[in-house]
Amino acid sequence: MMSCRGVLGFWLVFLSYMVCCTVAWNGLSRNDFPEGFIFGTASSAYQYEGAYNEGGRGASIWDTFSHKKGDVLGNANGNVADDQYHHYKEDIELMSDMGMDAYRFSISWSRLFPDGRGKINKDGVEYYNNLINGLLQKGMQPFVTLYHWDLPQALQDSYGGWLSPLIMENADVRGYFVWSLLDNFEWILGYSVRFGLYFVDFKTLMRYPKTFAEWFIRMLLKGN
C-alpha cells in the first residue's frame, strides 16, 4: 500500500506535469510549426452533410443500413446529421474565424450520380462547387476525399457492391482515395460519440464551440 508521503509525492509530480503541459500548450502558436504546415478540419459526407433525399441525391448503402432498426446504436442515421448541405456557409465562416488553412470533406457519390453512374446530378455539382468556391474565397484549401464508403445503393443492387468484379469493370474508381476501413466501425455507435471542435445541437442545428475549439482559435490566431 502506498504511504501518505508516496500519495502526496505522486500528486505533486502529477500537478507539476499538468502545470508544465498547460504552460506549454498555452504558449504554443502557429509559429512553432514548420513553414507550410497546414491546419485543417475534416468531415465525411454521410456523417455530416444531411439532406439525404434532397437536391436529386440517390440512396447510398449507408442510408439503407442505418434505416434498418437495430443496425446502429439508438437507430441513428444521417438523414439530417449536421445539415451542412444547408449550413455550409455558416460552417465555412466558423472555420475561417478559427484560422484554419484547409477543409477535408468527402463527396457523396450518390449526390453526383444518383444511380452510381450515367447521368450526372447538376444540383449535386452546384452544391460542391459552392462549397469549394466558398472555401477558396476565405483562403482555405479544399481537400477532397472522393469515396468515403458510401457506395450508391444502385451499384450495390446491380453488382453486389465491391464483392463483385463487375463493379470495377463498369465504375472506374482507380483514382479514388479510400479512407480507412476502420472508420466504418465507428458508425456502429451512431451519434452517441460526438467528435469535432464544435457541438451541433441536433434539435436546432446551432453550432457551439467546445473548449478545444477556443484553444485552437487562440493558438492559430496568436501573433496575427
Image (cartoon, helix red, strand yellow):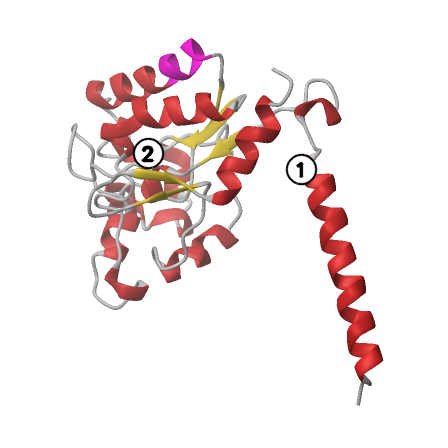
Image-based side of 48 in relation to 79, left or right: right
What main secondary structure does the magenta stretch of the protein show? helix
The answer to whether 153 is drawn above or below residue 17 in the figure is: above
Instruction: Note whether 172 is above or below 122 in the view shown.
Output: below
Q: Nearer the viewer, residue 175 or 210?
A: 210
Q: Is residue 187 above or below residue 59?
A: below
Answer yes or no: do the residues labelled 2 and 1 have beta carbons within 8 Å?
no
Quarter the C terminus occupies = top right
Residue at 80%, 85% (x, y): give it. 2
Q: Which mark is residue 191?
A: none
Disc 2: CA contacts within 10 A as few (<14), some (14-19) or many (>=20): many
Span highlighted in magenta in the image: 132-138
Residue at label 1? Answer: 26
Q: Type of residue at label 2?
A: Ser
> At x 56% / y 34%, what residue is drawn?
216
Please tell me which of labels 2 and 1 falls first in the chain.
1
37 to the left or right of 63: right
Q: Is residue 145 visible?
A: no
Q: Which residue is mark 2?
A: 108
Within the magenta stretch, is there residue 108? no
Q: Position of residue 42 (x, y in %)?
A: 47, 35
Q: Quadrant of the N terminus?
A: bottom right
Tell me where residue 154 sits by quadrant: top left
Q: Left or right: where does residue 39 sit relative to residue 57?
A: right
Q: Residue at x 67, y 25 (%)?
A: 30
Q: Amino acid at mark 1?
A: Asn
Q: Secondary structure at mark 2?
A: loop
